[in-house]
Amino acid sequence: MDRASPYDSPNPHRLYRDPQRGVLGGVCTGIADYFGVQPAVVRLAMLFALFFFSVPLVIAYVIALMVLPVRPPQLYRDAEEEAFWRTVSTKPDRSLAGLTQRFRDMEKRIVGMEAYVASKEFELNRAIRDLDR
């Protein structure tokens, strides 16, 4: 996928509208998906706000309907990728800590492999394996 700018984020977790699951253009469903809540909650909030802020709310809804892009069918490859990008968007410090821990674990395994390859035990196992041939 070609990006217009090298500064664009690869994070697919953005605000979209979802007309396939929505009622009127999918704006409420897109907002619910972005914030990780049930669409019914957003719809009820919109209905409640309609009584107090009807004109601004209708204008904002129409603008959102025109401006928000439609959600792509395959936004994430799998559930693990979706969970990762949602965490990056909502709790970046937690995702950074998780990545740091994964790299520490990987470094420990690499150090263990290096120690084994540089050990006498590795040389002995190699010699025994070569005798079998």
Image: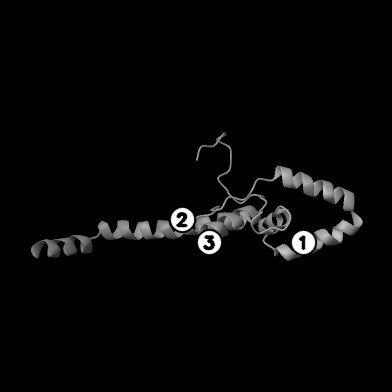
Which numbered circle lies on residue 11? none
The residue pinned by badge 2 equals: 103
- Left or right: 133 as drawn, with respect to 56: left
> Residue pushed farthest right?
52
The residue pinned by badge 3 equals: 79
Amino acid type, label 1: Arg
The local secondary structure at tag 2 comes to helix
Q: CA distance from mark 1 to mark 2?
A: 42 Å
Query: Pointer 1 and pointer 3: residues touching (CB < 8 Å)?
Result: no
How many numbered marks appear? Answer: 3
* Picture quarter with the C terminus: bottom left
The residue sitting at 74% across, 47% down in the picture is 64
Judge the density around disc 2: few (<14), some (14-19), many (≥20) Cα neighbours within 10 Å. Answer: few
Q: CA distance from mark 1 to mark 3?
A: 25 Å
Amino acid type, label 2: Phe
- Left or right: 54 as drawn, with respect to 42: right
Judge the density around disc 1: few (<14), some (14-19), many (≥20) Cα neighbours within 10 Å. Answer: some
The residue pinned by badge 1 equals: 43
Amino acid type, label 3: Ala
The residue sitting at 58% across, 43% down in the picture is 9
- Give residue 91's position: percent from left, percent from top: 64, 56
